[in-house]
Image (tube, rainbow, N blue to C red):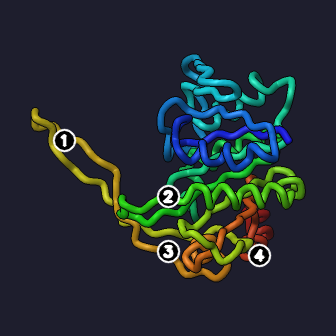
């Protein structure tokens, strides 16, 4: 296989190194990732200034842009004559569960691939909030993503669908579960402070306050010790409740 990997933690992050190591026995792996951390940048593309690439070593490139830029550079430039069979973004340091996928640069790296008809998988390691002393089990996450690739789930995805994978940070996950997106809760605080000239400035922050206990959700699955595998429809998915709106909308 030919696999392109990217991330939003930066080309030198331990998660992307672990991902490359896990996939190297089954594929030719090319790495194109940001030269600096680009977490929570969503699906940003660099349109207002040039992108620059640095070849760090063979098949490993640093890019001045964002995760979606990195995927695009792989498809349109670095690998244009040897198109990847799959793009994997990660291993992210921290969860990308529930609505957080819309903020995630990690998810954007995989989503950009799908927009260009290449299967995409994002993978994140779910670390405990506020525990800076915990050891990230990137090798465990790498083993699981290799299992998922070898099982060929990416080949069976419908058009404009990607996989979002979250691995609990434990030595022995109980297994894997197919999940839907849950809902995470944050305090959504915006702190007001003053600089030395007395001018106000703001920090967007807030504290994680848990998640809704929806059965079958990615949040609950990881909390129970399972690897969460969520197929995401990138065009959105109409629920049964919204289907009943059709007649009402037609009368507007």
| Mark closer to the observer (2, 1) | 2
Instruction: Give the mark, 3 or 1, whose residue is nearer the N terminus.
Output: 1
- According to the image, label 3 marks what residue? 211
Q: Nearer the viewer, residue 20 or 219?
A: 20
Q: Secondary structure at mark 2?
A: loop
Left or right: residue 6 versus residue 40 is right
Asked whether residue 111 is in view, the answer is yes
Q: Toward the viewer: 230 or 147?
A: 147
Q: Going 57% across and 55% down the picture, which residue do you hit?
A: 138
Q: In the rendering, at what x and y percent does residue 83 appear? A: 85, 32
Q: Secondary structure at mark 4?
A: helix
Q: Is residue 106 above or below residue 148?
A: above
Residue 136: which numbered mark, if any? Answer: 2
Q: Earlier in the sequence, mark 2 or mark 1?
A: 2
Q: Which quadrant of the view contains residue 171?
A: bottom right
Which numbered tag is attached to residue 233?
Answer: none
Q: Which mark is residue 200?
A: 1
Q: Which badge, 3 or 2, comes first in the chain's sequence?
A: 2
Residue at figure coordinates x 86%, y 42% from the top left: 1
Q: Nearer the viewer, residue 123 or 206?
A: 123
Q: Could you say whether the residue bearing mark 1 is in a helix, strand or loop?
A: strand
The residue labelled by disc 4 is: 240
């Amino acid at each position: 296989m030919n696999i392109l990997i990217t991330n939003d933690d930066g080309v030198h992050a331990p998660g992307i190194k672990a991902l490359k190591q896990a996939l190297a026995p089954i594929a030719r792996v090319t790495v194109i990732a940001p030269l600096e951390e680009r977490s929570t940048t969503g699906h940003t593309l660099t349109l207002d200034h040039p992108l620059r690439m640095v070849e760090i070593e063979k098949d490993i490139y640093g890019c001045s842009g964002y995760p979606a830029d990195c995927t695009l550079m792989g498809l349109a430039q670095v690998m244009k004559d040897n198109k990847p069979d799959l793009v994997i973004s990660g291993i992210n340091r921290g969860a990308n569960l529930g609505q957080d996928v819309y903020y995630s640069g990690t998810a954007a790296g995989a989503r950009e691939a799908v927009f260009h008809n290449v299967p995409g998988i994002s993978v994140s390691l779910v670390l405990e909030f506020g525990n800076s002393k915990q050891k990230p089990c990137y090798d465990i996450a790498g083993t699981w993503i290799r299992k998922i690739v070898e099982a060929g789930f990416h080949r069976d995805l419908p058009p404009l669908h990607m996989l979002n994978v979250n691995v609990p940070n434990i030595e022995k996950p109980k297994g894997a579960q197919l999940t839907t997106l849950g809902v995470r809760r944050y305090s959504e605080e915006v702190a007001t402070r003053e600089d030395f000239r007395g001018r106000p400035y703001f920090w967007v922050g807030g504290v994680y306050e848990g998640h809704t206990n929806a059965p079958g959700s990615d949040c609950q699955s990881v909390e129970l010790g399972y690897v969460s595998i969520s197929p995401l429809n990138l065009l959105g998915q109409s629920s049964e409740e919204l289907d009943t709106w059709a007649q009402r909308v037609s009368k507007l």
